[in-house]
């Protein structure tokens, strides 16, 4: 197995969307099929062109990715068949190495994501309504350790 974290390329789109779809079904079963279909269209049309995205490639296949908008984690997804292997942590470590402090939003009803972020060291800032989906989200922050 030869794992690599590298910059997203347009040829990765189909695999990235497959990862997002399979992981979303596990993490977000509460989201409507209509909302998920719209998000799938938004990924290549809106999100990827505006984000700095890295993929986790294992033996030539994309099995995870993280997308950043400045210090905001816009997305981090790992194929469910490859979860619990440290891939999400490696992707987050990469994001921290290039951006430092990070913020993100996670659905309150997503215990998988919430557990991952809590274990990583994110702390809750606020809870609010995510209007497009009608579900509540938590705003979280991760701060790198100060060396001063």
Image: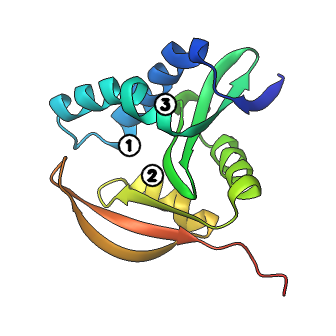
Distance between the Cα atoms at labels 2 and 3?
A: 27 Å
Q: Quadrant of the C terminus?
A: bottom right
Question: Residue sitting at 52 percent across and 52 percent down?
Answer: 73
Q: Which residue is mark 2?
A: 112
**Mark 2 and 3 residues: CB-CB less than 8 Å, in contact?**
no
Distance between the Cα atoms at labels 2 and 1?
A: 6 Å
Q: Where residue 124 appears, x then y in whole percent?
A: 44, 75
Q: Where residue 55 appears, x then y in whole percent?
A: 65, 30
> Counting residues from the N terminus, which is met first, the one under dot 3 or under dot 1?
1
Q: Secondary structure at mark 3?
A: helix
Q: Quadrant of residue 59?
A: top right
Query: In the drawing, does residue 137 fall left or right of residue 33?
Result: right
Q: Which residue is mark 1?
A: 27
Point out which mark residue 49 bears.
3
Which label sits in the foreground, 3 or 1?
3
Query: In the drawing, does residue 48 fall left or right of residue 93?
Result: left
> Counting residues from the N terminus, which is met first, the one under dot 2 or under dot 3?
3
Query: In the drawing, does residue 41 fall left or right of residue 7?
Result: left
Q: Secondary structure at mark 1?
A: helix
Distance between the Cα atoms at labels 3 and 1?
A: 24 Å
Color style of the picture: rainbow
């Amino acid at each position: 197995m030869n794992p690599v974290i590298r910059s997203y390329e347009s040829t990765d789109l189909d695999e990235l969307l497959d990862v997002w779809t399979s992981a979303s079904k596990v993490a977000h079963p509460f989201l409507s099929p209509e909302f998920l279909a719209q998000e799938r269209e938004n990924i290549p049309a809106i999100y990827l062109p505006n984000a700095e995205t890295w993929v986790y490639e294992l033996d030539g296949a994309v099995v995870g990715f993280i997308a950043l908008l400045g210090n905001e984690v816009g997305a981090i997804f790992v194929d469910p068949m490859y979860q619990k292997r440290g891939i999400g942590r490696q992707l987050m470590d990469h994001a921290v190495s290039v951006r430092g402090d990070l913020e993100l939003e996670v659905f309150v009803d997503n215990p998988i994501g919430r557990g991952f972020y809590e274990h990583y060291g994110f702390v809750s800032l606020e809870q609010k309504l995510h209007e497009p989906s009608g579900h509540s989200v938590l705003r979280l922050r991760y701060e790198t350790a100060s060396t001063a």
